Image (cartoon, rainbow, N blue to C red):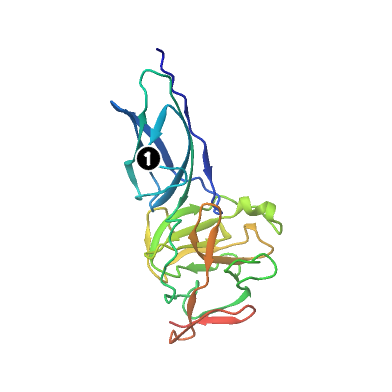
Amino acid sequence: MLRILLFLIIISITTEIFAKNQVKVYYERTDFGYQIFADNDEMCPVSIKFEFELTNLEADSEDGKVYLLEGDKKGQYLFDVRVIDKGKTYRLGYRFWNNIGDVLLDEYDEDFEYYLPFKKSESYKLWQGYDGSFSHQGKNSLDFTMDVGTPVAAMRDGLVVKVEESNSKNCNTRDCIQYNNFIVVYHSDGTFAEYTHIEKNGSKVKVGDRVKQGQIIASSGNVGFSSGPHLHVVVFLPRFDDRLTVKTKFLVGDGSESIYLEEKQIYSRNY
């Protein structure tokens, strides 16, 4: 009897940083059916989940189960798919979702003391704070007023996993989110930091670089969804359908105190 295999892959990426994740899913034939593997070319871990449409097949998995792929690693085994009756036709269909990081992670270092995202001996105004009325409703994001070309410092040690610096267009509506330039850094506790609106060709780092707290990583700009020159920063935990933005403590003044920043205040970094 003729055996039929229909193999479907539909990729859905639900991330707010507008860059496709470099994940490939494929199979190898076995005596019992197939083994499913994935290549993760991202530098950080990636979460992935599946939904199946199987005929005369059974998977050693279940709809919605989350797998965590190691960063920068190919040939990662996920699960088996077995033919139930080899004398009958069979059909394998699935789709999968993926996003950077561990989408199941809830615990992180809430007491970590972040550096302000600019050079020592400088001061900047926090124009929009957590849950701000202009564009931060329900989000724990921060906007610092900065002239174009202002050096941007890493708030925390980490691994650079995304860089977009090719855009130059801006406007004050969400239509321009697609033109955001940004750098995304992966932290040791599983959180990520995104530095957004950097100027065109303004990144000082590349994917795969490890950065130190206080290191200059970019120059600020006025690109993407931006009504004026500023730096947007956010720390978040990834999710498939969104991102969970988190509040962070910052060292201010001479570095002897760490606080949650307040909107419309001017902060100095003297450490």
Rendered location of residue 263, percent (x, y): 63, 78
Q: What element carries label 1?
A: strand
Rendered location of residue 34, percent (x, y): 34, 30
Is 35 rendered above or below residue 109? above
- Foreground of the two, 140 or 65: 65
Residue 105 visible in the displayed image: yes
Is 234 rendered above or below residue 6? below
What residue sits 53% from the left and 57% below the top? 182
Outermost residue to the left = 31
Amino acid carrying label 1: it is Ala
Q: In the visual, does 142 lie left or right of 116? A: right
Is 139 rendered above or below residue 73? below
What residue sits 63% from the left and 54% below the top? 177
What residue sits 69% from the left and 70% below the top? 133
Report which quarter residue 206 is drawn in.
Answer: bottom left
Is disc 1 surrounded by few (<14), some (14 to 19) or many (20+) residues within 10 Å?
Answer: some
Rendered location of residue 175, percent (x, y): 69, 52
Is 142 rendered above or below residue 196? below
Q: Which part of the image, by quadrant, shows the N terminus? A: top left
Q: How many numbered discs?
A: 1
Residue at image mark 1: 38
Report which quarter residue 3 is drawn in.
Answer: top left
Q: Which part of the image, by quadrant, shows the C terminus? A: bottom left
Residue 168 visible in the displayed image: no
Rendered location of residue 5, percent (x, y): 43, 22
